[in-house]
Image: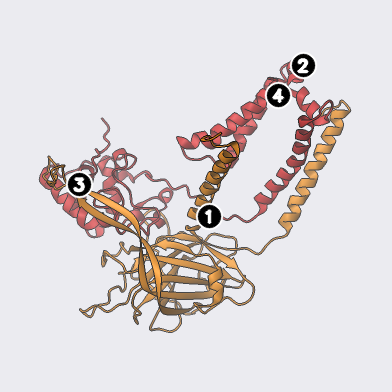
Chain colours: A red, B orange
Amino acid sequence: MTLAMKGAVLLVAVFLIVKFGLPLITAPLPMSLIWLYLFLTTVGIVVYGTLSGESTEALLGPIFRFLSGEGLNGVAKSARLAVLVLVPLLVGWETYSDLAPGTQPPAENRTIHPAPPGEFVGLANPVPNTPENVMMGKGLFSAFCSPCHGVKFNGNGPASDGFNPPPANFVDPGTIAQLQESYLFWRIKKGGVGLNVEGHPWKSAMPRWEVELPDEAIWKIIMAEYAGSGQKPRTWE
Amino acid sequence: MAGTPSRRARLAVLAAAVVFWWGGTLLAQETAVVRVKLIQGEVPMDPLAPIWNTIPASEFPTSPQVHWQKRIGQVTVKSIKVRGVHNTKQIAFLLEYADPTQDPADAAALEFMVGDKKAHFAHGQPMAQVEGGPVNIWYWRNDTSGAADMNAQGFGTLKKQARQDVQAKGVWKDEKTKVRFKERKLNLRKDAKGELMKDPKTGDPLFDEETKVVEQDVTGVWRVVFTRALTTTDPNDAQFQPGTFPNIAFAVWDGKKLESGDLKESGSQKAVTSWWYFNAEPPTNYAIYFYGLIAVVVAAGVEYVIIQKVRKGKPA
């Protein structure tokens, strides 16, 4: 395999990894970032390929021969023609796509668990974790929270369907299992409108429960949410 | 070879899978945005105008309102189909939803943010860490002609504007429609002997939840059209520009009178959605085709120069 072909394979591999591989473990990357990675890879290939006269010939020789068309015939000749026609068409399509009005709403980079205000950091649950209190918490949860968060604590309550974003699924290990009890206290007490700008408070359906529930009831609900969902609050230990 | 799919068949299956995946993705995205189609001529004020049948609908499930203390657990209207058209001057939205009874207090509303500040979908209620703006609400009620053009910025602040710019008209038809919604059932868990299972720690009965999307026939459909100019001179109004993605939210009230004399849904007891988007289709800008063509010509020219230099032994 020539150096030019190795470079082409590397570029394709990098594209496949950042476009389709990374989204399997993290959020999809924007095209601008993908282009940046491809650009950096190309720069690396060019720098590596032009370290010596020999490697420069190995890198650029096949490319120049392909461009000039010298000595090409059969499939290679057709491929050259196809590339020469496709490249300007792709440039034209990209230009059109960039200028054409978008059909999708703007991307929303909402932070699901934004930082809480300082006064809500590290608060300990003052209500003893007894079966009676958990039971009372489950009763409160059933009355106030389950219409949205569901009787199975899975965010699938009958009142959840119209809300975007949907109510949190506490059974999911990515929600309350990642949070301390004090964080939940803040979210329940102050509701969706208590979020900072990163949390997009204007979209949240979470009521400000401090208007209707005393703090003690909120702490009991928190115990019930952990007990009912089978999760444990995050601690510093 | 018998039993072995041919290469063509495998390719066909692969292509079908790609089309299905792509199509599915497009359909899923369509539901999040109301596509307000650009039309020639007047926007229809009539909810039964034939043009509405040519406009694709976006469907939004609803929830009972939960922010205000006076809540209800169930609402009549489970989802709303929304269509939109505009002619660069006027915009019209058609709301279509199943409601088995036509009642004087049946009502529907659209909500928009006013200005650049974000506003909470529940009447622009104040946010602790974000300076929010007001919302503009277009309200229609069956027993009142026209529409109310209102503003709110917090609970109890709803106020009719001095200048009314919105028109609305509703038509109820005694026709059958299908309503799709999520149905949830709780099934008590039983062991192999048919005995009810209990949580060993708490003694609570164990149960499983069964959720499925069901389709139900309902007789009775409301179609309500709201119209307004895309832009107005009233600073209290939401202003719309084609090509942008303003937020939109919906609310519906079933004004059926119960035996107690109360209305089934009124005031804060209503079906709502949170913010979604609409997009008024922009007029075709033919310049972008021209710019695309220029890009093709320039790219081809650069290709030509490079090839000529390579052929002459002077790489670019």
User: Where residue A217 appears, x then y in whole percent?
Assistant: 18, 52
Disc 3 marks which amino acid? Ala
Q: Which mark is residue A4?
A: 4
Q: How many marks?
A: 4
Classify residue A90 as left or right of residue B140. Answer: right
Q: Earlier in the sequence, mark 2 or mark 3?
A: 2
Indicate the secondary structure of the residue bearing disc 1. loop
- The residue wearing badge 3 is A224
Label 1 and label 3 in one chain: yes
Q: Earlier in the sequence, mark 4 or mark 3?
A: 4
| Residue at x 51% of width, y 57% of height | B30
- The residue wearing badge 1 is A105
Pointer 2: residues within 10 angstroms few (<14), some, or many (20+)? Answer: few
Q: CA distance from mark 4 to mark 3?
A: 62 Å
Disc 4 marks which amino acid? Ala
Classify residue B165 as left or right of residue A67. Answer: left
